Amino acid sequence: MDWIEVIILLVKILVVAVALLSGFAVMTWFERRLIAGFQVRIGPNRVGPLGLLQPAADGLKLAMKEDLTPSQADRVVFVLAPMVSMTAALVAFSVVPFGPPDFRIFGRLVPLHIAADLSIGFLMLLAVASLGIYGIVLAGWSSGSKYSLLGGLRSSAQMISYELAMGLALVSVLIAAGSVNTLEIASKPALWLAQFPAFVIFFICMIAETNRAPFDLAEAEQELVAGFHTEYASFKFALFYMGEYVNMITFSALAVVLFFGAWHGPFVDRFPLLGVVWFLAKIVVFMFVYVWIRATLPRIRYDRLMSLGWKVLLPASLLWVMITATWVTFVK
């Protein structure tokens, strides 16, 4: 790896990190404005035109709040837990291709469309995304609060349960695509129609994985206060908040890559840069659906949440893997 490749790699990492953090800030405004519209309210409109500076005001408010650590907390783990969640959320996006591989710099083809082109990129993405569970469990345990501990255990059980069904659903996509490289999968035609059952299972699981309504049982105020991050404040609380939204963006990007043709769209062949626009537009649609579901569906009971994961989604995803494998082996 020469110095040009090193510089390009560092620039790509910086651009992806800044884009995700900026996406988090925009998403907080986007969600509040959308929910206000759904509920016939005004929403943030005081700070900046249309309230666009509200995310900056929220960040300033969090930064100025007093950062307390409970006396009974494990101080080292208490500080590390939000960092683990946020780091896992950022690193997971590194193998997501967000544009066509048609860019040249100094006469050489440069993979600007992906931060890290790994041969097992898909497996790496799932492995890193799973590390976010540790941040939640450690946050609940290290706080020294029974409510935080119960929230952490509940959230980890929920995420592990739905990861099994989601993993099996995605196995069928990998079988159909014949690759575990995210870039190779993104280069293939959209699979949402051929793999529609897998997409439905994945979509439900990605909502549960990101602890979003109606599966936000880890933050049930009526029984667990704020759940695993009850004792967190200031910047450490903001890291959990940022990690949740970055995970939403990452899972939406993964759904776009696996099921909806990634960057493919009209005129991309003539204007490769337009592929990035198509990719972002598809992600925005998924983010809109996230908010739409939150504003529409009530929180379900925890036992029904677990029953859905273990008794419905897991058997359904396993059955679909068998059907896909049989089709690829004997028909395709």
Image (cartoon, helix red, strand yellow):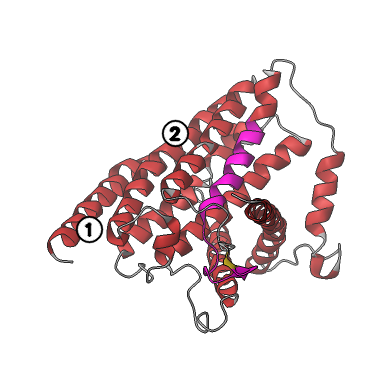
Q: Is residue 144 left or right of residue 44?
A: left
Q: Nearer the viewer, residue 188 or 194?
A: 188
Q: Is residue 92 above or below residue 190?
A: above
Q: Image quarter for residue 192?
A: bottom left
Is residue 52 among what the camera can see?
Answer: yes
Q: Is residue 6 magenta?
A: no
Name which residue lies at 75% across and 67% down.
42
Location of the C terminus (image quadrant): bottom left
Q: Amino acid at mark 1?
A: Thr
Which residues are the magenta region? 81-107
Q: Is residue 53 left or right of residue 104?
A: right
Residue located beneath label 2 in the image: 157
Q: Is residue 99 magenta?
A: yes
Q: What numbered label is drawn on residue 217?
A: none
Q: Is residue 148 above or below residue 323?
A: above
Q: Amino acid at mark 2?
A: Ala
The secondary element bearing badge 1 is classed as: helix
Residue located beneath label 1 in the image: 324
